[in-house]
Structures are given as structure tokens and as C-alpha cells.
Amino acid sequence: MSSVDYVLAESQKRQTKEKEEKLLEKIQSSKKTVLENSCKKIDFKAPIISREGNGVIYPNTINTIQGQSGVHKSRLVEIFIALLLSKLNKPRFLGFESIISREYFATYADTERNLKEQFPYALQQIKRMADIPIEKLDIKLDPFSFIDISREDRFTALKLYLDDIRKKVDDHLFIVLDVVTDCIGNFNDPKESMGLIDLMNAYINSYDVTFLCVIHENPGGTEKARGHLGTELINKSSTVFQIGFDTKGSNLIKITYKKCRNSKRFEPIYLVFSEETKGLVLADQSQIEKAKNSKAQKAKIEEVQRVLGEALKEPASKTDLLQSLGDYFKCGKRTLEHRLKTIYENQLPILNDKGQKLVLDKYSERRLVFYALIPTEK
């Protein structure tokens, strides 16, 4: 080995050793902090957003709004930001409340809307709900867009921007990433996805910040947030809201709490879009009851039994069967899944085109669920 190679090798060893020592120091430091705090009385922080006396979003957490495209995810974001900037809890905030004695500063990162009309209009909506004059520029809301930044540069740009803004803000920083999958180059890449998750985790543990991430669900009516990033984000989130139309073709919007780490799951919230305010408002009881009655009338058990007898001449995968039934009955997948479950569990009789009495059978094959009609044992 030459003298130059020797020096380089020794330098590499020193750098490796120094890195290992720093990692060990971090672990020892976190252990000391946890042990010391475990010996004290723990006063949990009050939620920054609550509803009907129940904490919904807590400080220093990651939270997520998920839903299909076009279900008003961003309008729910507008309501949360307006609530934190307002000094009054009003009905326009869908029953959500905040600690108005505390000061908040919102940072709103948008990745989809244009800069001339769509994103500015969203900011105007926030101002209207928070009783802030439209022409007022100096407010505690800092919007920025990723439209003009290439995907491969967005993660770096986000980190630079957040590092800069947190140094200038003394209030609790409420950071919205809408849409979070557009903040990295590839939302299916585990390394990039975990890099963004690690950044958010580092922030909530080191600074006075809270994250609210908006993410699309996979197309096709599934309830899974998009990509590897979506999977990890839901795992790391404290509260996960799902927003969508109650049933296919319905105007009734439903917010479901898919995850509440700090509390029990709460009852769904039903909303409608108001043409007057161009925003979301609470649905009245008559609208909710009308939707429930409509669902009950769609795909009645007897009708599903009849259609199964005519159409299920050979085994079909659950996906294909639901698609076929959905095309026929024009109703949501959940309704049909419930009907199939009722028919299968109660072994309700089904007559085929030959007049034979059959029952619905369900089995798994190659990790897929299949349905078939088999002779009844009765």
C-alpha cells in the first residue's frame, strides 16, 4: 500500500469512527431524555384543533387528509387554516374549534393549482372565513407553490424553505403539504418517501410545528393512499381524515376518521358543498336521512340474489363481481360488499336460470378472493 493510500484509509477509518461515536451519543442523549421525563408528571399538550370537546389535531404531530380526486380535500384544508388564523370559533368551521389564546402561523405548500386564479382564490377563501380583509398582505399565512420547481429538486427546495421560515416565526407553525406526493421525485421510491417522513419527524421533535398532509387515494375507488409514501405516511400520522362522497353520484360528503392515535375514533361528519359560499357546510339531518334511505333502496338483497342467479354462472373474482354488480345497480362498492356479506353469511337461497336452489360460496386462490354458486346442503 502506498503512503497516499495509507493516509486515505486511515482518514476513512477516523471518519467512520467519528460518525459511529456521534450516532451513539444521539442514542444515549435520547435515552437520558426519556428516562428523565418518565420520572416527572407528564402534562399532555392540548389539541390545536378539536371538535365537540374531543381533540382532533395535536401539536407536534403529522396528520393526513386522504381521498379520491375532486372530493374537496383542499377545501377542508382551507377551513383548518382559517380556523387557526381566526380569533373566533364560528359555525363556518364545521364545528371545529381551536385554542384562540395561542398564536399560529400557517405555511401552505401547493403543488397543483395555477398561480393566477386557483391558488390565489383558495387564499381569498381562507381570508373570508377568518374575517381577514382580502387586500391585506401582512397576515400569518405563508403560501408557496411547487409548480415551477422540477420534481427532482422539490424535496431540497422544501427543506430549504422550511428551515428558513421556522427561523423567522415564533408562533406555532402549521405546515400544509398539498399534495404531499408531489413534494418528492418518486412517491413509490422507499428512500425518497422515508426521506420526507424523516424530515417531518425531525421537525415535530425539534421545533414547535405540526404537519397536515393531503394525499390522493389510488384510482378505482380504493381507500389506499397513493404509493409507498402513502403507506408510510398513514403509519406515521396521528390523525387520518378520509373525505369523499357518501355514495357514487351523491352530493353528500362524508368525513371519516380512519385513525385517531390520541383518542377513540369519532363519528363521521356529513357535509355538502355550498354554491353560495363556494365552500363546505354541514349537512342538515334531512339531507343525511335522504342519503341513508337512498342507499337502503339501492341493490336490495332480493335483487342482488336474483342477479347473482342469472350472472354468476362460473366463479368470479371479488373485483370482477363487484365491478359487474356496480355497473348493474349503479351504487357504491361498500353497499354491494355489505349485500354479498349478508347473502353469504346467512346462506340465502339463489335460484339459477334452471330453477336450481344454490347458495353463495367464497374462497381464496392465489391471494385473490373468489365467489361461486354451489348447491345448498338443505
Image: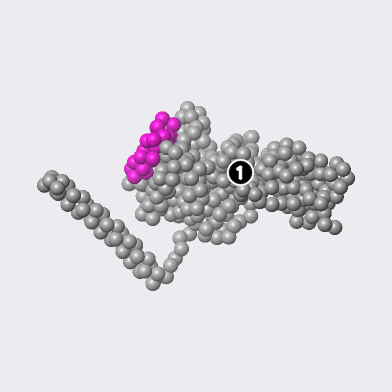
The correct choice, above or below, for 284 with respect to 249 in the image is below
Q: Nearer the viewer, residue 319 or 1?
A: 1
- Residue at 76 percent across and 39 percent down: it is 329
Q: How many marks?
A: 1
Residue 1 appears at what percent x and percent y?
14, 47
- Residue at 41 percent across and 30 percent down: it is 148
Taking 93 as reference, is 137 left or right? Answer: left
Q: Residue furthest front?
A: 1
What stretch of residues is rendered in magenta?
145-164
Q: What is the basis of the colouring in this image?
A: one colour
User: Which structural element holds mark 1?
Assistant: loop
In this rendering, does residue 126 appear at all?
yes
Q: Residue furthest left?
A: 3
Taking 73 as reference, is 362 left or right? Answer: right
Q: Which residue is mark 1?
A: 222
- Residue at 34 percent across and 41 percent down: it is 160
Q: Nearer the viewer, residue 300 or 134?
A: 300
Let me know if residue 336 is in the magenta part: no
In this rendering, does residue 289 appear at all?
no
The correct choice, above or below, for 152 with respect to 92 in the image is above
Q: Amino acid at mark 1?
A: Thr
Residue 55 appears at what percent x and percent y?
53, 57
Residue 194 appears at what percent x and percent y?
42, 48
Taking 163 as reference, is 48 left or right? Answer: right
Q: Main secondary structure of the magenta part?
A: helix
Let me know if residue 163 is in the magenta part: yes
Residue 305 appears at what percent x and percent y?
81, 46
User: Considering the image in quadrants, where does the C terminus appear?
Assistant: bottom right
- Residue at 46 percent across and 33 percent down: it is 135
Q: Residues within 10 Å of mark 1 (few under 14, many from 20)?
A: few
